Amino acid sequence: MEKTTENLLVWYAKHKRNLPWRESTNPYQIWLSEIILQQTRVDQGTAYYLRFISAFPTVFDLAKADEESVLKLWQGLGYYSRARNLRFAAQMVVEKFNGQFPASYDLLLTLKGVGPYTAAAIASIAFNVPVPVVDGNVFRVISRLMASDLPIDRPSGLKFTREQMLQMIPAHEPGNFNQAVMELGAMVCKPVNPDCNGCPIQTQCLAHASKSTSNLPVKAGKQKVTPLNIRYAMVIFKDQIVVRLRSEKGIWQGLYDFPELNFKQDEMGCLQEAETLFGTKMTLLKRSSTFTHLLSHRRISADVCVFHAEQVPITSADCQLIALSALATLPVPRLIEKMLPLAENLI
Ligand code: SF4
C-alpha cells in the first residue's frame, strides 16, 4: 500500500492539471470549486469559478450578496438549488463560524449543500485531515486496483472503497492523495480504454494483472421489485397451533412462519384445502385483512385464514404443533410478527 501511495503522490505532483483552485488551500476557494464542479465538466466549471471568485473574493462577500446576483452568475450551470445553498452556506460560515470554515469533517457536513464528498475534500485539502473522498473516479480506481467486484452502488462497495482509501491515505498529504486518486481516475484510469501503460500504479493493480479492467467497477443497478402474494393458514387445535420451520435456503432460513394455502381461492376453497392438508374437519374462524411487507426485491401481500381443527392436525415434516403460549418465543420474520396478535387473541 505504501508503494501505491508514494507512486500516486509522485505522479500527481508531476502530472496534475493546473486548475485555479489548486494553487490554494483556502477552504473558501476549495469549497466554491467543489460545489461548482458537481455535475459540471472541469472546463465549463473553471470559467464559472473564476467569475465567482472575481465577484465574491471572500466568504463575507458571498454571504452579503443578494440571491438574484448569485443566481445570475450561476446561470447556465443548472441545479439552481446549489446556487441558493451556496449563498446560504456562506451566511452560515459568517454567522456561526465568524467567517472561518470549520476544520472538522463533521462540522463541515452541517453546512447547507455540503455532503460527505465535499466535506472530505475541504477537510483534507484545506486542513490536512486524513479523511478519504469517494466519488465516481475513486470508485473506479479502487475497484480496479483491488480487482473488487463489490457493487459500487451498494453499501458494501462504498464501505470497501472507504476502507481501502483509509489504509492508503497518508497523514502528511491527505489532500494531495485524495486529489491524486481522483485525477488518476479522470486522466488515466478512465471508464473506457484506461491508459494502463502510463499508469503509476500499474504494477500494484490487480485488475491489470488479471486482465479484468474492462469488467470493473461493477454496478448492481436497480433491483426489480416483484410482487408476491401469500395466504397463510393458522391452524389451532385446543391451545396449540401449527407452525412451519423455514429450512430452505433464503433470507428466512431458520425462522418460523405458518403453512401456506393457495392465495387465489375463496374462503370455501381455502377451508377444503386446509382440511385435506391437515386430515381433519375444520372451522374457518376468520380471514385477516392484507398485511404488506417490503423486502429489497419483493413486495409481499399476505393474509391469514385462522382455522379451528376438530382433531389433531396431521403435520408434514417441516411443520409442528406447539403451544400457543410458546408462539411469541419463536424467531419469526417481521411479517409474521405483525400477524401474531391474531393468534394471541385466541389464547
Ligand atoms: S493499471 Fe490500468 S486499470 Fe489499473 S489503476 Fe492503472 S489505469 Fe486503472
Image (cartoon, grey):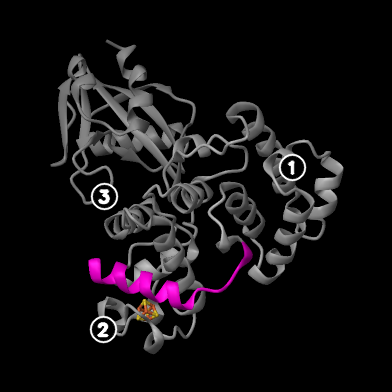
Magenta stretch, residue numbers: 1-20
Q: As shown in the figure, which amino acid type bears the numbered disc 1? A: Leu
Instruction: Pick the quarter of the image with the N terminus.
Output: bottom left
Q: Earlier in the sequence, mark 3 or mark 2?
A: 2
Q: Mark yes or no: residue 293 visible.
A: no
If the picture is divided into quarters, which one holds ligand 1? bottom left
Q: Which residue is mark 2?
A: 209
Identity of the residue drawn at 73% across and 47% down: 83
Q: Seen in the image, is 69 located left or right of residue 142? A: right
x and y percent of residue 199 in the render?
Answer: 38, 82
Q: Position of residue 316 (x, y in %)?
A: 16, 40
Q: Nearer the viewer, mark 1 or mark 2?
A: 1
Question: Which residue in the protein does label 1 denote?
Answer: 62
Give the amino acid type for the residue marked by disc 2 in the picture: Ala
Task: Determine whether the beta carbon of the residue marked 3 sits less than 8 angstroms from the nearest atom of ligand 1.
Answer: no
Q: Mark 3 to mark 1: distance in Å?
A: 55 Å
Say above or below: 211 vs 157.
below
State the residue at coordinates (37%, 80%).
Answer: 213
Residue that extends furthest to the left in the rendered view of this protein: 317
Q: Nearer the viewer, residue 180 or 78?
A: 180
- Disc sitting over residue 250 in the figure: 3
Q: Earlier in the sequence, mark 3 or mark 1?
A: 1
Q: Amino acid at mark 3?
A: Gly
